[in-house]
Amino acid sequence: MNVAVSDSSFSYDVHSLVKAFFPEEDIKIVGINDEAALHVAVGKDTVSVSADRNERTADRAEQFTALSRPDVKNVLKRNLYSVLSELTGKSLPWGTMTGIRPVKVPMKMIREGEDDEEAARYMKSVYLCSDEKARLAVSIAHTELGVISSLNPDGFSLYIGIPFCPSTCMYCSFTSYPIALWAKRTGEYLSALRREIDYLAGYYRGRRVDSVYIGGGTPTTLSPSELSDLIGHIRASFDTSGLLELTVEAGRPDSITDEKLRALSGAGVTRISINPQTMNDATLALIGRAHRSEDVYAAFEKARAAGFSNINTDIILGLPGEDEKMLAHTLTEIKKLSPESLTVHSLAIKRAAGMHAYLEEHGVTSVNTEEMMAMAADAAAELGMKPYYLYRQKNMAGNFENVGYALPGKYGVYNVAIMEEVSDIAAAGAGTISKHVMGSRIERCDNVKDVGLYMSRIDEMIDRKKKLFEGE
């Protein structure tokens, strides 16, 4: 599908909104004179949107000369949304919001003294959000503000990337490589990683770390001694006197052993994540998870025996072939496990992931519904959890969101810190991204994703961070 624009300034926003209505289409932004199925025009004094023979025009010369760019963008997106909604007969739960952090809107308003009703009204009128999503965002904003208030005044968060997994899941587009291909070089990778950690420790000397998150990939593909040594090096390098959380993704149940769990517990890990994604064995086999649901139960039993009292569990809604009945089974089994937090993901199909090709080849669609999202929310509530963070991605099934639910006091500190961008994220490892927060301005630098290139170019990765943090 082609979308013609007369002003490229808003091309990204137009593309994102059209894609939300037509997720199966390949959307292309083209010049206004090219053939197009949709026509969007933005001028100084008018905002017009036309589609086929339906046209909405607002001639507001005086008003638009005084409007800011964000205001003009919002008017354009509301007009475009109206046309697309009429064309398709669909409405989107988040309205015109296409960014990944919708909670930022009510959080800003609450900080400025607005009440909850006004924040929800603003989200509905300006962004056309549904009542449910507006209330959800406002509720999470309050919870996140509570977590943010617990952060150290001079704090930052540390992310360590371990880019290895037992196997590659069909839906995954993260930096991850089968451990079998790199088993003989993990020592080399960890050596490069320690060099990057050492630079960060020097830069942050005298400042306390709020949270440490070791993710990937699957960090528990490393050996018990490698895990112990890595975490020991982190603790010896940074001021952890104010540490609120040390999380390790033990995401794949087939990577978890008693020895590794004891190593994590002994190193002072306070939170782990065991992620079945689904408790339906047929789906697990389809998506390339080399474990069965019974392995999830065993992993939980081992983790509890090792002393872990803060376990997160991830599930994904919208996996191929999964319907409400299959989701109900997953939720029933999750409730039996009784984790301290539950992260509910809406499947986001990335072009880099194998699932994109699979769905096209087999003509299978990804289904997620309001009813399924409500089922997951109800299950979390039955476990005593409340929603505490939220984010969105492109191409999400049902145009919904990812929501983290947790018991009071078990909220994931790192998850809130990275979503709200209130302090630095110092990241080390292949494919990681560091963020330097300087008031209202945020700058980033990334590491190369390829493991071999990361190791051979580690000096360059460190130099990138020097430029980011020190301006060199």
Image: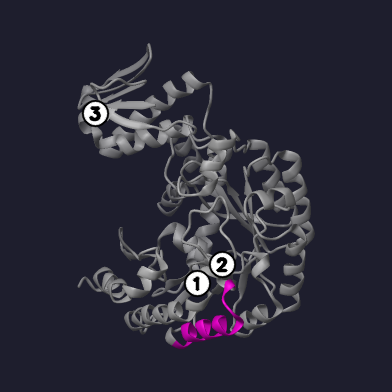
Query: Disc 1 versus disc 2: distance between alpha carbons?
Result: 13 Å
Q: Which mark is residue 259?
A: none
**Quadrant occupied by the N terminus:** top left
Q: Which mark is residue 64?
A: 3
Secondary structure beneath label 1: helix
Q: Position of residue 433 (x, y in %)?
A: 38, 63
Eye-nearest disc, 1 or 2: 1
Q: Position of residue 376 (x, y in %)?
A: 68, 47
- 9 or 135: which is nearer to us? 9
Q: Earlier in the sequence, mark 3 or mark 2?
A: 3
Residue 29: in magenta span: no
Residue at the image position 41 percent from the left and 68 percent from the top: 451
Eye-nearest disc, 3 or 2: 2
List the residue tagged with mark 2.
Answer: 218
Q: Position of residue 237 (x, y in %)?
A: 43, 86
Residue at the image position 48 percent from the left and 53 percent from the top: 173
Query: Disc 3 versus disc 2: distance between alpha carbons?
Result: 51 Å
Residue 223: in magenta span: yes
Q: Earlier in the sequence, mark 1 or mark 2?
A: 1
List the residue tagged with mark 1.
Answer: 182
